[in-house]
Amino acid sequence: MQKFTTGFLIILLIAGGFIGHAQTVSTASLLKEMTDFNAVTYWPKPYYSAGQASSYDRHSISPDKPGWFANGDNSQFIRVEQNEGHKEYVMLDQEGPGALVRFWLTTFKRAGKLRIYFDNNPIPEIVIPSYDLMKIDLKPGPALLIPHSSYQPLEKGGSTLYLPMPYAKHCKVTWEDAQPEIKEPRYYQINFRKYDPSTTVRTFSLKEARSLTTLLDKVNTQLLNPVNVSKGKQSLINQTILPKQTASVNLPKGTNAVKFLSIEVSTQDNQSLEKLLRSTILKIKFDGEQSVECPIGDFSGSGVGGRPLQSWYRTVTGDGKIISRWTMPYQKSATVSLENQSDQSVSITLKAISQPYSWNSNSMYFHAHWKFSEKVPIKKWDETSGAIEWQLSKIKGKGIFLGDSFAVFNHMHTWYGEGDQKLYVDGETFPSEFGTGAEDYYNTSWAPVVLYQSPFANAPRADTEDSYGHNTFTRTRNLDGVTFKTDFKYDLEMLGWAHGEADCAATTYWYGFR
């Protein structure tokens, strides 16, 4: 009888996730996590917090002290080390267990060596013979290694690496410049996970990475060509909604998740489409509480106008059809509504496909929140008296921040996005993520913005070369999601190349508990 009881207990522990908690974090496990739409709906197990090292201006110490808007966001390092007769500028020095999950950098001329060390090994695992991630001696694929829109193979421009690199004990990243002293601007942002000390991690190695060719090919294919769910219970709104009226549909009862959502507006007039995408509001209630309230165009990540977008979580087709692949779970009930706030009727079709979902104590609800401000003042970056930070989002509670869309109408004929992002978690007085410029945060460099598409960052609209008019940036997070236990805040410095103003709209995506 005692043997039967012990065996039964082991079965219960496995079913309850005990074995899952002890799972080893590896390059392969993180790659598989990247392409699991359900993974982001659960509070992470093993738990991690998010961190970032960047080249932000070190004169920025505190909001109540001079230098908070300082803009010398390049060639700023933790320290300088002497190693076998040469200088190494330390960009990141982080105790493990952890994982590098996003590495962004840019510069003009690139001569030098970039090194990545793991687990206090004095010999670097990775040596890149240039300030250029495109020169890494690996082939992670076009979804994981992305040249910026400004990238030039010989000189100016940067790139972003999404290949996860876990480490058990320690990680250090350094730069050795070709010149005795650094003369070229070296910008960088390195996002990483910090796991609980008890987490078992298998440290990244080039040998293992090169053995993952089949998995890397699969991940690249999935990220660049995400599959839309077609099987499940379908819910439909297909009607003309009169001005100031709302159309709604109840989703299947029980424990389910929306796995696919599409929205189409019928119009032949582009001007009307722009207006209707901003004035038709998507609202979703999960288990009686509203978690989504957002104009459908902004929800899509395309901003104003329904411009084409191709990303991991969202697609906007050339004819303006909006597709969402966010997994949106609920326990008992859900209602999707479309509210027409305009003065004209809108003919619209919405389709939602739901599937059964495994809800447990770590499950979270999907949220999308929209904010809009007209004529936000922008200060010239070197004349920052009176400068402000525009707050994209402020969240109370526990959850994971998974990205945003930033849709701007710029009133100036010059760049507006010189300011840095500042992300605060759980009451921080200094941001745990401090950026180097708006375009850098959204995975490009050297403004003004031009159109680009990638799985986790896009610029679907740019009206003019000098950035006047409508601009849209969007970035969704995956392995670089930001966990928070009590609160989250995202501020953006409103700095540009001249004094002026802009109309700003932000859509924030996150998962959270009730």
Image: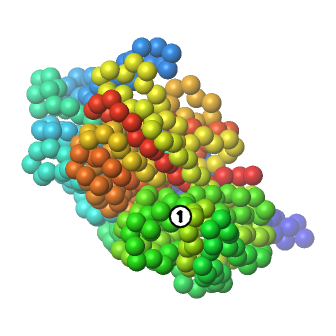
- Figure quadrant of residue 89: top left
The outermost residue toward the front is 343
Q: Is residue 152 above or below residue 91?
A: below
Front residue (pair 189, 112)? 189
**Left or right: where does residue 483 sit relative to residue 453?**
right
**Left or right: where does residue 376 sit relative to residue 10?**
left
Q: Is residue 429 above or below residue 344?
A: above
Q: Which residue is mark 1?
A: 296
- Figure quadrant of residue 426: top right
The outermost residue toward the right is 1
**Left or right: where does residue 70 sit relative to residue 406?**
left
| Position of residue 218 measured from the top left corner of the image (x, y, whole percent) | 37, 73
Q: Residue at x 20, y 39 (%)?
A: 107
Q: Residue at x 52, y 26 (%)?
A: 430
- Figure quadrant of residue 147: bottom left
Residue 409 shows up from this direction: yes
Q: Residue at x 58, y 85 (%)?
A: 231
**Left or right: where does residue 447 sit relative to residue 167?**
left
Amino acid beneath label 1: Ile
Task: Give the class, few, some or many, for how many residues have Cα within 10 Å of label 1's Cα (few <14, many ≥20).
Answer: many
Q: Secondary structure at mark 1?
A: helix
| Position of residue 464 measured from the top left corner of the image (x, y, whole percent) | 25, 52
Split into 4 quadrants, where in the image is the N terminus?
Answer: bottom right
